[in-house]
Amino acid sequence: MPQAIVAAATYISAEIGAFVVAAGGSIATAGTVADIAFAAIEVTSYAALALGINAAFAPKPPALGAISTPYKSGIPPRQSGFGKTRISGPYMLFEAAEGGSFDVVALHDGEVDGDGVTANPERYFMNDDEVTRNPANGALYSTSNDQLFGGGPPGHKVFVETRLGLNPQVALSLPMALDVAVPGMWTALHRGDGVACLALTCAQSKAKDQQANFPNGVPQPSVVMRLQKVFDPRLGEDQADTSTYAWSANPVLALLKYLTNAPGGMGLDYARRIAPTIDDWKAAANDCDLEMALLAGGTEPRYACGGVYSHETAPSEVINQLLQSFDGWLSQRGDGALIVRPGRYIPPTVTFTDDHVTAYSVQHFLTDEEAVNQLVPSYTDPASKYNVIDAGAWTDAADYAARGVLRSQTLPLVWVQSPSQARRLAKRRMSRLTAPLRGTLTTNLYGFIGLGERYLRLKISENAALADLVVEVANVNMDLANLAVTFDWVEADPDIDAWNRFSDENPATEITARGDLPPLTAPTIDTLTGVYDNSGTGLAGARVSIDVDAPIISDVQWLVRWKLTSAADWQEAAYTDIADGASVTLLTGFVAAGAAVDVEVAYQTAGRTSPWSVTVNITLTPPAPGFGANVLFNEAGQAMINQALQVMTA
């Protein structure tokens, strides 16, 4: 080899890092000395191990998404995230004292969004119950269950406050009450600078109310938050300028930050890796923000993301999640800069002809064992408390009909939060899985101009199938010793972006999410009647007989509470073994004859309690002496009362 070419090959081996990796994130090489030199130089930046991952062809990612349950760990790994999602994390404090509990949970390493206008967190959960937070005092309550966490004031039992991860930031105040019992446990010095966190305090309920107030046991908090702000080069290209950062769910911007300066990210040099190709990054971000019409009305961005990653997660896995959310394609050009392409067909600008091609192979079909003609995408659904649900199967009906065999595969998209987006991504993946043609193409040195291109045009005259064909690049192998480049490719579909929301989205028949049970409705009191006891020589006592409209539900337990109108405290009784029916009759305990009495009723079924009925008042007028045969209360009624009041609580 002439010395000039050797020098050129050495330079190329050091600087041309363009590659697309299909499986496992490793570089496919021919094992030459030049290849080894390339690997030795590029691995120092970790780029050679992770940056070439192409979501279109990579293996399925691990489940990195919403984290909804706090956990205990001696030295937990840090975690950060992008977009908006449900998040919890490791306990920083887990103590009980003074008849209550005090918890602090670390949510996010690094500052999260706080624009001073929109609340962040946006939603609150205790276990799997979504609750509302009173901004005045931090109390949590349920709008559908007025007994949860003690109900409304003054019965609140659970309080929450949060911090956004400022540096420095003010310490959480709720756990400072612990200092009375355990001095120094949590003070104003426990600021948690740079960590978004949550404090939770719970007060003990009375024994009789414990199950109703805390039906799921120990409260486990999680919140829905807008996570870290991202650098947006469309606001300015200086990454050091704080005015260029804003919260966004745009996956291209999230990928840019993860590669450069995100907490737990890769820390690549922005000036070398991103700045030279910044126009490509801007164009890709704009493609993601393109509004798509929805079947249900309105629009949404073409691609968005939301998820949480541990700082111990391999960078390749996080990058893969981000790329999957926008069908992204990431490669490296000759000067080491990174090129990103969104999930959008771009007409090719590079053509390989007979003059450039030294070898090729073509595969016209896939065996049944290799084929996939049905994808079942799943996504994280904000409407289902950020649980993962199916978006409905996407089937290539033509391939299924021709093959006569259904080959189904799951497509987990846990950083995607829209069924429409999940189905658009499934369509793109299916197009590659069922492409009519696929193969390899080896070129001479001219092939280096194709590095960093997602789509190429082939014009090989000796093969009719390749006479004029647009292909999508799946992987690139470089043999620098022989100055050759080999591309793995599949036939591209120029119409892949066509989308009919009426026939393609179709969430009404495809989505199979199970919603929450509707809340129980409050019962209605029909009539109240005074009931008097004449079992002795005179008036022994009075009760209130209650006729109630009953729900047509089996296995109902009725609750009654009553009090003198002038009193503050209620007395309660539970009635079991009441026959199912459209109405029931209940009795209070003894009250003073002649008094004004307030009465309410509720019912329990399947572990849930209805709201209390509207308060109804009755004044019990004492009967005249010797009322004898006119009594409503008699010896036969006494047995019913004794049975109904078998479970009486003060």
Image (spheres, rainbow, N blue to C red):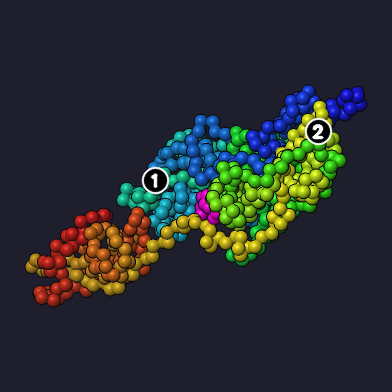
The residue sitting at 39% across, 56% down in the picture is: 147
Q: Is residue 281 visible?
A: no
Magenta stretch in the rendered image: 383-393
Residue beneath disc 1: 217
Q: Amino acid at mark 2?
A: Ala
Distance Cα–Cα, label 2 vs label 1: 65 Å
Q: Is residue 60 left or right of residue 587?
A: right
> Is residue 392 within the magenta segment?
yes
Q: Which mark is residue 514?
A: none
Q: Can you give x and y, in whole percent of width and height, for residue 453 in the image?
A: 78, 44
Locate the N terminus by quadrant: top right
Which quadrant of the structure image shows residue 597?
bottom left
Q: Is residue 403 left or right of residue 644?
A: right
Which quadrant of the structure image shows residue 424?
bottom right
* Mark 2 / mark 1, whichever is N-terminal: 1
Residue beneath disc 2: 484
Q: Can you give x and y, in whole percent of width and height, for residue 335 in the image?
A: 83, 36
Q: Is residue 293 above or below residue 530?
A: above
> Is residue 592 within the magenta segment?
no
Q: Is residue 345 above or below residue 312?
A: below
SS category of the residue bearing label 1? loop
SS category of the residue bearing label 2? strand
Q: Can you give x and y, in whole percent of width and height, for residue 488 in the image?
A: 72, 40
- Residue furthest to the left in view is 537
The residue sitting at 86% across, 40% down in the picture is: 355
Foreground of the two, 477 or 250: 477
The residue sitting at 38% across, 65% down in the picture is: 521
Foreground of the two, 467 or 21: 467
Q: Amino acid at mark 1?
A: Gly
Q: Can you give x and y, in whole percent of width and height, for residue 634 in the image?
A: 12, 69
Q: Is residue 581 visible?
A: yes
